[in-house]
Amino acid sequence: MRTLLGGLLLGLMACAGEEPVAAPAEDASVAPAALVESAWQVRLAVDATRAPFEQDQGWAQLFMREYPSSLATFAGAGSAAGQARLHLEYAGLYRQAAWLAANATRQVYGPDRQETDPADVSYLVGVSQGLAGDCAAARTALGSLEPATRAGPLGPGVAAWTAWVAVEPCPSALSTPDGAILGAPGAVAVGTLPEGGALPPLTLTERSDEKRAVPAMDPTSLYLVSRWHEAAANAATPEDDAALIAALLSPWRLPIDGPGAALPAGEIADTWLFGGFATSAGDVAFLAVAGSQGLAAVEAHKATSVLAAVLAPTIQSGAVVPDLVLDQAALFGQQVEAAMAAKAGKEEGFHRPFADIARVAVLRAGMLVADAAGQYRDAGILRINALERSTGPTGDPVFLMAVAAWDAGNRNPQRAQDLIHSLTGRFPGVDAARYPLDAMHIRLARNAGPATPVH
């Protein structure tokens, strides 16, 4: 009988019609063998090491990115490690959903704001600027609010954010009364989703003779759901893994959260790595700071992180070269496949999807470094290349949401809407981010010339 994961992978490969990849030439190695050997893909090429994941339905579902089913399976089996991992994934997803909503809100009610927009949108702008870490802009927006807004349903949110901007410098956390903000989740319960299901939209009133209703949403709600899942991940762990959870979440943190902190050296359980885009403990430490330290992070971690080692040759004249990253990612995938075959004693069907995750991991790591280095265009090239390869086991919902958020910040609502649509239904509440996104799309279409399409 086929194992659960093995059966899923064989089916995936059959549907994709993939041909076996030829063994790479000896000079195709792009990372030290010892670092490649530390990757979860290579270590789990051994049947006995892979068995706990391969024979468990929850891990098979996680690998195929079926997160709701995976969480339910882990909860039913009482798997603390599995539940912690899923809550971590959900925390990243909702962090990026909040970022999408914030970016769209800053666009539609920032440069595109109109006199007829509801007065309450100043609060939404303040929230969005707060999530962006712009304390001064948030303070200005919140300071312009009318008394009616402060006394209405948005009042608790106004109070929480007003307290946040009152501190100088603004803190890296938002203090909120439990359940006071519209859409805020209830008490943390490991293995479940927050109470309330889909987040409730706001209905604001346009300042016009027609007084039309304007659907909107408070990005704070999605941010609080993310923090709920982060707290659940910490509550689910049998030991204190707070620093590790913070490091794993670091690539998806928002500016309000501050930069990721360095992770102390040490081993990391495979339950945190399997199916993920950090292949080893060294990669976790590298990725935790890559988005803030950029090129310096590559230099500091290239001896302990295989991803940093693969990226090191792609830095030329003080900048990441996207074409070199693409080449290195392809060669690294070949090296990982060869290492898995050597470890297992033969080539197996799961080697290709395991290696595909490693390939995309290089692109995503290069994107983080390029972003931190101020190479906006180059980071975008790597981001889109990673997106094009994000299907099946590489189709990470957190990354898809992050691309949608990036698109919203670039005033590109079309692809963001498509990405949100692919996630709606599986993840309660993420569709709430469509309210500001749709508003931006409509406003850009109205303001565009008749021959100017809105992408």
Image (spheres, helix red, strand yellow):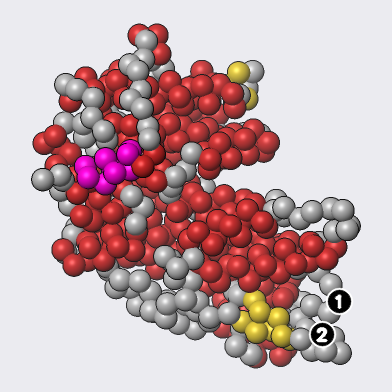
The residues tagged by marks 1 and 2 sit, at their Cα atoms, a distance apart of 8 Å
Res. 88 visible in picture: no
User: What residue lies at 55% left-to-right and 71% top-to-bottom?
Assistant: 432
Q: Quadrant of residue 446?
A: bottom right
| Residue position marked by numbered label 2 in the rendering | 207
Secondary structure of the residue carrying tag 1 is loop
Q: Position of residue 273 (x, y in %)?
A: 30, 43
User: What residue lies at 89% left-to-right and 57% top-to-bottom?
Assistant: 449
Q: Quadrant of residue 428?
A: bottom left
Secondary structure of the residue carrying tag 2 is loop
Q: Nearer the viewer, residue 303 or 159?
A: 303
Q: Nearer the viewer, residue 169 or 339?
A: 339
User: What residue lies at 45% left-to-right and 24% top-to-bottom?
Assistant: 330
Q: Is residue 247 left or right of residue 240?
A: right
Q: Nearer the viewer, residue 418 or 313?
A: 418
Magenta region includes residue 10: yes
Q: Position of residue 372 (x, y in %)?
A: 59, 38
User: What residue lies at 42% left-to-right and 77% top-to-bottom?
Assistant: 197
Magenta region includes residue 206: no
Q: Is residue 239 left or right of residue 148?
A: left
Look at the numbered discs 1 and 2 and tell me whether their residues touch, using CB distance below 8 Å.
Answer: yes
Label located before the other in sequence (1 or 2): 1
Look at the magenta stretch and give its main secondary structure. helix
On residue 115, the disc is: 1
Against 125, residue 96 (above or below) is above
Q: Residues within 10 Å of mark 1 (few under 14, many from 20)?
A: few
Q: Is residue 359 left or right of residue 172?
A: left
Start-end of magenta stretch: 6-14
